[in-house]
Amino acid sequence: MNLVLIGMKHCGKSTQGRALAAILQRRFIDSDEALERLYAEKHHESLPTRQIFQKLGREGFRRLEGELLDRLAADVPDNAVIALGGGTPGNPYAAAALTKLGCLVYLEVAPEVIYPRIVANGLPPFLDAAAPRESFARLYRQRAERYRAVAACRVPVQQEAPPEQLTQRLLALLKDRL
């Protein structure tokens, strides 16, 4: 069964995904990187995810993301670790594929911990520039509700815990699902 990590941007999905894949000797797939490759394939230019979102707009981005998840659900063998983008679980174009990908694991980080991480490299396009904290709080509530609804399990992530400690907690939690 695939392990599929979900959660807010900068919660540790890619870091934990790579670590779990290495320990479990599984293929690792970062959906943001895969989305960038799909965009380049379709549009003949390479852009980072943030610029793809800006160029295509929310609707176009979510459609492309849905196409990516359809491909992953159809093509990925049942022994991968997949890190999804933060908004993917709420994407209506990805809903059908999401249920086929594998065991969804929610890496839950408190909003006061995750907000500074998200804005550290500039305000992302999914936040309102006029009221970034307020729009983040709304987005966090919406996404957390969706993550909880689709996840097979939740793993609280403490700010001070080293990544290796979280990897060991994840392995212990998931041992019966592997």
Image (cartoon, grey):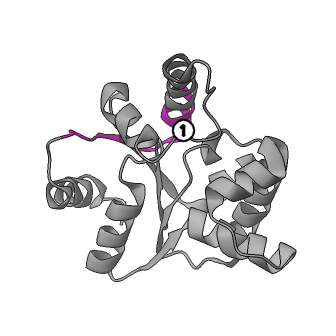
Residue at 48% across / 21% down in the picture? Answer: 133
For the residue labelled by badge 1, is the local secondary structure a helix, a strand or a loop?
loop
Q: Does any portion of residue 31 appear in the rendered image?
A: no
Task: Please give the count of numbered marks on the rendered protein.
Answer: 1
- Whether residue 126 is situated above or below residue 95 in the rendered picture: above
Q: Does any portion of residue 83 appear in the rendered image?
A: yes
Please state the horizontal and vertical placement of residue 175, each as a whole percent of the image.
27, 61
Residue at 58% across / 79% down in the picture? Answer: 77
Residue at 66% across / 38% down in the picture? Answer: 90
In this rendering, position of residue 27 left or right of residue 74: left
Please state the horizontal and vertical placement of residue 83, each as a whole percent of the image.
49, 60
* Residue identifier under label 1: 123
- Whether residue 131 is situated above or below residue 23 in the rendered picture: above
Which amino acid type corresponds to the residue marked 1 in the rendered image?
Answer: Leu
Residue at 60% across / 31% down in the picture? Answer: 127
In this rendering, position of residue 107 left or right of residue 142: left
The reply to whether the magenta stretch includes residue 62 is: no
- Whether residue 38 is situated above or below residue 89 in the rendered picture: below
Locate residue 174: give its quadrant. Answer: bottom left
* Range shown magenta: 145-159
